[in-house]
Amino acid sequence: QQQVKQSPQSLIVQKGGISIINCAYENTAFDYFPWYQQFPGKGPALLIAIRPDVSEKKEGRFTISFNKSAKQFSLHIMDSQPGDSATYFCASSQGGSEKLVFGKGTKLTVNP
Amino acid sequence: NAGVTQTPKFRILKIGQSMTLQCTQDMNHNYMYWYRQDPGMGLKLIYYSVGAGITDKGEVPNGYNVSRSTTEDFPLRLELAAPSQTSVYFCASQRLREAGELFFGEGSRLTVL
């Protein structure tokens, strides 16, 4: 089973700080790298995604950085807010989403 | 527009009992998925369907069955429930196969005692 290794397992950040979550994948054929955000009691929801033809994608305060040679990608949350407190999952796939492999998740807590 | 709706939200089963988790979507998506989420383990794919009448196994299909008689509905059947099936189950749907956005339901929390 192809793996996606996510770290850290949990993260505590002060309001206004930068949150960084890292993921590493094994399969060099992976061509789609989404991040999902999950609030307690809710299902995951797509936050942002990137393909390997770009090294960075930014949407508001959320940025994905992608390093193809290192087989790593990371999520940066700038100016972190208490409302960002959630569990974040990275994922990777090649082709269809039936092959989407999720990381184990990072629980982010942003203190006010 | 309700999106993906799962029922029930909570259920307690005794070992050996059977039940069906219901999932329906109103977005006319062809692709539907069932995941289970265990603490610290991420999401594991149980079964998926690419359209009515077509289903296939995911990573952890043992102990489960699915059917897809309509585009809207994708029920997950648990036969002979075991404590290892205690988990939160999520149904998801997708418009396109090629790495499109997955829309998740709010989950069904199942406890097997």
Image (cartoon, coloured by chain):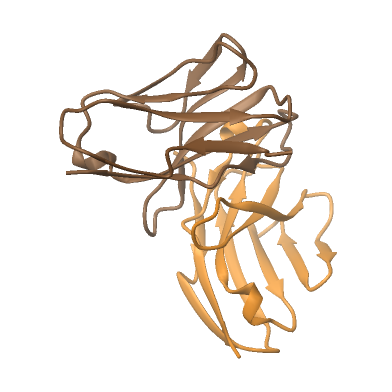
Q: Out of A57 and B45, give the one closest to the viewer.
A: B45
- Residue B72 percent across, percent down from the top left: 63, 22
Q: Out of A9 and A66, give the one closest to the viewer.
A: A9
Q: Residue at x 28, y 39 (%)?
A: B85
- Residue B64 percent across, percent down from the top left: 34, 25
Task: Determine which quarter of the picture holds residue B100.
Answer: top right
Q: Residue at x 34, y 46 (%)?
A: B87
A50 relative to A56, above or below: above
Q: Residue at x 15, y 34 (%)?
A: B15
- The quarter of the rendered structure image containing the C terminus of chain B is top left
Q: Which chain is orange?
A: A
Task: Please give the count of numbered marks on the rendered protein.
Answer: 0
Q: Is residue A55 left or right of residue A94?
A: right
Q: Out of A91 and A88, give the one closest to the viewer.
A: A88
B22 relative to A60, above or below: above
Q: Residue at x 56, y 62 (%)?
A: A39
Q: Is residue B68 left or right of residue B100?
A: left
A8 relative to A13, above or below: above
Q: Colour of chain B?
A: brown
- Residue B86 percent across, percent down from the top left: 28, 44
- Residue A8 percent across, percent down from the top left: 49, 72
- The quarter of the rendered structure image containing the N terminus of chain B is top right
